[in-house]
Image (cartoon, rainbow, N blue to C red):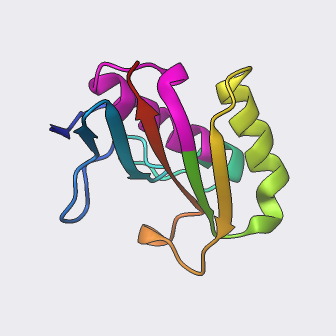
């Protein structure tokens, strides 16, 4: 089942915001774009927060919650900003700690500073 929500930016290509297969939700990479006004966040802390809000919007559209997120993939333009990203990520998840990978990417869609994807599992 494909998941689509107006509470996250629309897909900019031939993909879905999320796909539910069995009890697993795969959330496509979310950019730091505010879906309400189309503004792209460029500050790494604000951009991280916006990406995570967009991920959560897709998760919630599928009927799941933040604590159902089991893994995140983080793609950053500059891994030198890891500390700031990590602080914002920690504030967002608090005591919940999904598995995670973080890598530096040479270039991201729309030349954003960060993109985050996720996997969530329904119990």
Q: Quadrant of residue 89?
A: top right
x then y, percent, for residue 94: 72, 22
- Where is 71 relative to 57, above or below? below
Residue at the location (52% across, 64% down)? Answer: 112
Residue at the location (74% across, 20% down)? Answer: 95
Residue at the location (54% across, 35% down)? Answer: 70
Answer whether residue 66 is magenta in the image.
Answer: yes
75 to the left or right of 102:
left
Work out whether residue 31 or residue 93 is closer to the camera in this orientation and state it. 93
Answer whether residue 99 is magenta in the image.
Answer: no
Work out whether residue 54 or residue 94 is closer to the camera in this orientation and state it. 94
x then y, percent, for residue 114: 58, 59
Quarter of the rendering occupied by the C terminus: top left
Residue at the location (38% across, 23% down)? Answer: 122
Dominant secondary-structure state across the stretch colored magenta = helix
Q: Quadrant of residue 45?
A: top right
x then y, percent, for residue 99: 64, 42
89 to the left or right of 11:
right
- Where is 46 relative to 63, above or below? below
Work out whether residue 47 or residue 71 is closer to the camera in this orientation and state it. 71
Inspect this view and state whether residue 43 appears.
Answer: no
Number of numbered markers: 0
Quarter of the rendering occupied by the N terminus: top left
Inspect this view and state whether residue 99 appears.
Answer: yes
Q: Which residue is farthest bottom?
A: 106
- Segment tinted magenta in the rendering: 48-71
């Amino acid at each position: 089942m494909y998941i689509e929500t107006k509470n996250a930016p629309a897909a900019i290509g031939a993909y879905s915001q999320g796909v539910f297969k069995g009890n697993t939700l795969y959330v496509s990479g979310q950019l730091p774009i505010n879906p309400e006004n189309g503004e792209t966040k460029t500050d790494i802390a604000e951009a991280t927060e916006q990406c995570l809000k967009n991920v959560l919007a897709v998760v919630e559209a599928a009927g799941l919650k933040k604590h159902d997120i089991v893994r995140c993939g983080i793609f950053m333009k500059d891994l030198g900003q890891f500390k700031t990203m990590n602080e914002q990520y920690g504030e967002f998840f608090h005591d919940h700690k999904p598995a995670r990978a973080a890598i530096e990417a040479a270039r991201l869609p729309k030349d954003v500073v960060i993109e985050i994807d996720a996997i969530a599992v329904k119990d």
